Structures are given as structure tokens and as C-alpha cells.
Amino acid sequence: MKVLITGAGGFLGGRLVHALLAGPADLPPITSIVAADTLAPSVGDPRVEPRTGSIVDPAFADSLVDDEVAVVYHLAAVLSGGSEADFDAGMRVNVDGTRTLLEACRARGRRPRFVFSSTVAVFGGTLPAVVPENYVLLPETTYGIGKAIAELLVGEYSRRGFVDGVACRLATVTVRPGQPNSALSSFVSGIIREPLAGIDTTCPVPLDTPIWVSSPAVVTRNLVHAARLDPLLLGTRRALNLPGLSVTAGEMLDSLERYGGREARARVRLERDERVARAMCGWPAALDDRRAIDLGFVRDSSADAIVRAYAEEQAAR
Amino acid sequence: MKVLITGAGGFLGGRLVHALLAGPADLPPITSIVAADTLAPSVGDPRVEPRTGSIVDPAFADSLVDDEVAVVYHLAAVLSGGSEADFDAGMRVNVDGTRTLLEACRARGRRPRFVFSSTVAVFGGTLPAVVPENYVLLPETTYGIGKAIAELLVGEYSRRGFVDGVACRLATVTVRPGQPNSALSSFVSGIIREPLAGIDTTCPVPLDTPIWVSSPAVVTRNLVHAARLDPLLLGTRRALNLPGLSVTAGEMLDSLERYGGREARARVRLERDERVARAMCGWPAALDDRRAIDLGFVRDSSADAIVRAYAEEQAAR
């Protein structure tokens, strides 16, 4: 089976490439992966074909999708901070880029499974404690608007039979290794990652701020699962609330302390950042993920497990 | 006050031009109206400037919006039948055209009131008997998708301060005079208009199919009202369920019979059209329009009043 991944040079993209190469159960053997990004990753496996370019460019998008591509993972995006800072870039990549890629699939006429990474940020306004899957999309960020429009496009291109789409609303992925990124939620990883590396950092939101999170391992596993979902079970509702854990910033810090001790926690100073706090308070505290669970997606067991898994992975490097 | 109307050559556009020229109470005097359409109307009033072109063309859209335009009515659209038959035309006009016009407003930096004519067709899937304003948008037509995306754009361009937008979800406008149009709901006017003109016609849906309707006079009055709504009262929820009446096809025919007699009703033959019936059954039977009523929008009193007003207007021509 041939797979295309956009945003393959990103953190999730990279994990997904490796997960697919490992040959997940229930998926046909992966014959090749087109790994596209504005700076394509070099993976060092003959099955991976790196492709550098922008999906906003129709010629590039067209060149990515051939008759053999059975699954498209569309992860490329301008993140929440970047989209808020540069409206045009956010709209161009998150809206126009998605449409260009959908058009490339449509032009081939092979109706690939199209897995789109959406976000909890499609929700906004006054939200119930647990947001149902069919709650109104009222995003309050340019990032959320772009993703909401892209969800509608994925749904419509599926209804018209151009692709077989699934929009997966991902929780905030934590703990991400490496450097902070331009997501407004970047601190959710930072408050665990930096202290465990002996670095002081700040928590920009109040400790009782609830956050909907998922570990990189669970998100990757769920993205793999999305490739093999039966379209009959999806029906016309192509957007899915992927499973997550609802934890507060304080609970994450409690887990940090249990794993890394008091000195780790002492490295996190509370310092409110209005821009971040406002965005996080507008995002859902929890999503109703029962349909996804019924469809075979999985969730993390606890904040402790997320912190431990991250620390052990880092130690093993 | 200078006003721009796209789709000014259409039925609603034409009525709106005349309503504005008549000088509605509470609106500043209308100094000029830019009446744009793919075939601009000739109105014969020196205040009306007809402009022929397509809003999909950025140069044309730019030329429509100058520093004096205080209110933009964006009515131009490919209707539901046309969008379903030609996906690309529907997306180009309803999505790209709206964005191009919003961009033209943004480029001027004057933040005009932007009144967008949306539709009940933004709703779909399993619907409650009365659809709340913040119900999920799950359209099941290309027309509905285009309008839903445009609503999101109007909301976001308002949030960013590029325009001061209001998306008005119009009910099915009935009774429209003249010829059938490409809307799937065209028959809703046809089953009244044709019999009253002595012409046989068909009703393509079961008699108990509920339809959310509004008369041309009420819709026009509500569009005028949308120009002067206080943005503070709108807040971040820029999409409004405009008032309507929930009537069944059978109730409309009962009104027809009360006004035009048995022989009028006998001119309507039941002949199911699967394409129309499927679309109508997917649209809401009624919307929760309480917020719009609170904001000063009005609704029709009864199906009888709608039929009578139409017949009297025709008789007066």
C-alpha cells in the first residue's frame, strides 16, 4: 500500500512515518511512503520518498498523488500561533492547501482514504463541559477557522465521492520533545519537558485550566487506525472527536512532581500570558469521544503514564 | 450612505434596491447603490450605479468597494440546484466569491457592515424539530457547504476586524413571481404561483413535508434591518437564524385553495421528485429564531397572509 503524508517533516509526521514502516497489524504492507513537507525529511529507508514543496502549489500537490496512493495523511498546517500572527499564511495553507490537495485526489479519481488532522480549536464560544461531536463549530482563532473550513471540505469531498475522508480532531499532543513550536498550546509540553531537562520554564495559564491532551504514542496509533476505518461505520459524519484525557495544568505538574520530584516542579513558574490564556480558555476542556472509542480508537490511561512514557523515551535515546 | 449589493439583478436583490431607494426609517439617507451582478439591473434611478461582472474576479470585486461603501449586501450565489449540478461553479462563486469580496472590503480598511445571505441549507443530518442557532453545520448539499464555509469566513473576518459581518440564514422565500429558478426549493413558490396563473404544476414532495418559509416582503424588510443592527448586540455569534414560518406543503395548498378556490388547488398534481424530496427532507422544518426576533427582525403572520399578499401584488401590477 502506498501512503502520502503531508507535514511529514513535523513531529507527528515523523512518528507516523516510522509507525507505518514498522508494519502495523491490520494494515496491508506499506510499499512506499511519499513524505512531503516544505523541508522533506530524510528517513533513510528505501520505501520513503522525500518530496520538498508546498501543498499550496497545485502542481506540487498534483505530483504527490498518483494512482497508487491509497491513503493520504494531511498533517501540514500553519499552527495556532502562526495563524493568529499571519492571517494570510494560515488561510493559505490550512484552507487553500487542504483544498488543493483534495483537488489533486479528485483529479486522480481513485478516492483515497483522506485522513485530515483537525483540532479541538474548531470549537469555541460558550462550550459545555464535555463537547459533543455534533456541537457547532464556532472557532475563535484563525487556526480554528481554517481547520473548521477544512473539515467541511473533507466532508463535502467525501459526500461527492472524490475522497473517503476522516477528519480527526486531535487533542493537544503532549509531551512533545525538542523545541517549543508556534502552537499556543506549546507550553503544555514545555512544562514537563523543560523541567525534566533541568531547564526553568513558565506556565502561562492558571493551574485549574483544563486541557484536553493525548500522548504522541496514542495519537500516532490513532492516526494509523484512521487509515483502516470502515467508511460504512463513519456514514456522513466524517469529523471525529479523537479520544483524549482532560487534565488541568496543575494535574500535569502534579504528575511531573511525582516523576521528577519537587525540584522539577520548582522549575515551573506561574506567569500568565494573556494571549495563550485566552486561547486555552476558549478551547474545550473535554470532548465526547465515545464514537471514536466505539470505532476502535484508544486513549491514554493517565497524566502520570504520559509523563512517565515521555521520560522513559528520552532516557532510551 | 453608500450601499453595495451583489446579486442585485436577482429577485431579492431587486426588491432590496427598491426598498433602500424608498428610504427606510432609521437608515441614513441612501446616496448611492452599487448594483452588481453578472448582468447588472437597469433601475432608472440616478442613485443606482449598475455594475456588470463576476465577484470571483478580484479586480471586479475591488472596483466595487470604495471608501464610501458603508454597507455591503452579498446576495450573489449559485443556488442549490445549480451547485449540486456543477460543484466547481458552486464552490467558486459561493466560497471563493465571498472570500474575494471580503478581501476587497479588508483592503479598504473601512470595516463596512457586511450582510451575507445564508440559508437553512447549512443545516443537515439528524435535526431536532426546531434547530437552535448554535447547532452544528452539517450540510448535505454543495450549496449548503458553500454557505456554511462563507458563514465561517464572515465570522472570522469580523473577529479580525476586517468587516462588521452578519450572516442571515434566510428561510425559503415564497411566493417568488416569474419563472422557476435553479433552487431545489423552487417548487415552494411554484405550487402557489402557477395555479393562480391558471397553469398546471407539480408538487415534488409529500404533503406533510415541513418547509421553513418567509415572504419576499418580510425577507426584504429583514435584510434592510440587518444594515443597522448594533454589532455589540451581535457579539461573536455573527450567524443569525432569521425568522420564518414552518408550514407543510399541504398547508400551503390549503391556503391556495382558500384564496384561489378548488380549481386552483386542482392544478397541483403530486409527483415525487427524488432529488428535490431528499434535499427538502434534509433541511430544517423550523429554526429557533428567538434571537433574531429579540434583535428586531420580523416574521410573517400566516401562510394565508403570504398567499394573499402575493396575489394582491400580482393583481396590482
Image: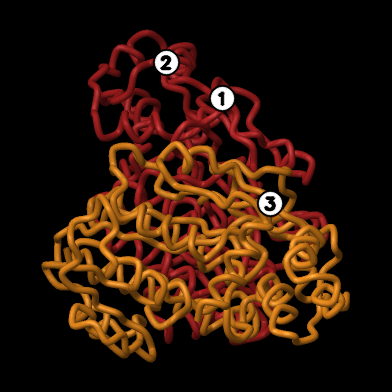
Chain colours: A orange, B red
Give the x, y percent position of residue A17: 33, 73
Instruction: Inspect this view and state whether residue A155 appears.
Output: yes
- Which labelled disc corresponds to residue A123? none
In this rendered view, identify the residue nearer to me: A26 or A241.
A26
Q: In the visual, does B244 lie left or right of B247?
A: right
Tag 3, which secondary structure? strand
Q: Nearer the viewer, residue B27 or A293?
A: A293
What residue type is disc 1 on? Answer: Ala
The answer for which chain carries disc 3 is A
Measuring from the top left, give residue B108's x and y in whole percent: 62, 86
Kindly indicate the quadrant of the structure image that contains residue B132: top right
Is residue B49 found left or right of A285 in the rendered image?
left
Q: Is residue A273 above or below residue B71?
A: below
Question: Can marks 2 and 3 be said to lie on one chain?
Answer: no
Instruction: Work out which residue is located at the far left of the displayed protein and give it.
Output: A67
Residue bearing mark 2:
B208
Q: Which mark is residue B129?
A: 1
Identify the residue at image location x=18%, y=61%.
Answer: A29
User: Where's the N terminus of chain A, which quadrant?
Assistant: bottom left
Between disc 1 and disc 2, the foreground one is 1
Question: Quick one: label 3, few (<14), some, or many (20+) residues within 10 Å?
Answer: many
In the image, A140 versus B204, the foreground residue is: A140
Kindly state the secondary structure of the residue where label 1 is placed. loop
- Amino acid type, label 3: Ser
Cα gap from disc 1 to disc 2, whole angstroms:
14 Å
Q: Amino acid at mark 2?
A: Asp
Percent x, y of residue B186:
35, 38
Can you identify the residue that label 3 sits on? A246
- Is disc 2 on the same chain as disc 1? yes
